[in-house]
Amino acid sequence: MRRQRTTYYIVGVSILLILSVLALARGGLRRSGSIVLPSVQTDTGNAGENDAAEGLDVVQITPATVQPAINTLSRPATYSRTQRVETYWSGGSGVSESQVSVSGGRTRIDTPLPDGTILHMLVIGGSAAIWYDDETEWTVLTAEQFTADIAQRMLTYETVRDLPVSEISEAAYRELDGVYCIHVSTKEDADGYVSSYWVNVNNGLLKQAERYCDGQLVYLFTAEDTNLDAPGEELFLLPDGSVWEGA
């Protein structure tokens, strides 16, 4: 009976998570993209962050040029990092922190819940295997438009590539916490929402994102330092030790 209640709980939480993030992104999650990083060449002959900075300054990131610049970015095929999502509403707020591990088309997300248990998600394509703590049974969920980014509650910066230039209010090359980023802000939409993205040019990953409604912060995504080493293969097994290739 406890296992049955746990399964219902996981399914309920996961469906709510998917619906809430789809609503937050408001159709912006069109593409999850595969990922690889820009090679920026300069006349200095030096490689590294300074090269990236000088190269992007030459490009002059503006609303008119930011889409080609973002199109050169790709996410690494393997990495792991800790991500934090804060949401705010009238009279309250919530915080969720997850350990995310990626290897090719597989994403593993481990999220501690308020009661001390851990929710595990293994996402492949448009489906996720979900289990609780160290249980050996799992539930598979599949949803239209579902992606690993949605599972991470992460705004998808690749959406900027599809935006009309007229909907971009600001684009620039800026430093955030010592990291060089392409920063993009959208204009306020008909519902009063504005999105802001900070994309790390050294690894093509979203470093920070904010979403505002009528000028009030409602969503904040932040990511800690990224480890580009390949995560252990055991992370991408089902809890019984078997290999899963998605639904």
Image (cartoon, rainbow, N blue to C red):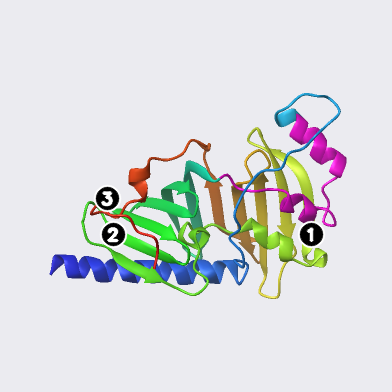
Quick check: 111 above or below 16?
above
**Crowd band around label 2 with a 10 angstrom C-alpha radius: few (<14), some (14–19), many (20+):** many
Residue 117 is left or right of residue 93, and the answer is left
The quarter holding residue 113 reads bottom left
**Crowd band around label 1 with a 10 angstrom C-alpha radius: few (<14), some (14–19), many (20+):** some
The numbered mark at residue 116 is 3
Q: Among all residues in the image, which is located at the extreme left? A: 1
Of 234 and 111, nearer the camera is 234
- Residue matched to label 2: 131
Q: What is the x, y in percent for residue 16?
A: 41, 70
Residue 247 in magenta stretch: no
Region of the chain picked out in magenta, as a range: 51-76
Q: Amino acid at mark 3?
A: Gly
- Mark 1 lies on a secondary structure that is strand
Q: Amino acid at mark 2?
A: Trp
Q: CA distance from mark 3 to mark 1?
A: 42 Å
Q: What is the x, y in percent for residue 4?
A: 18, 70
Which quadrant of the figure contains the N terminus?
A: bottom left
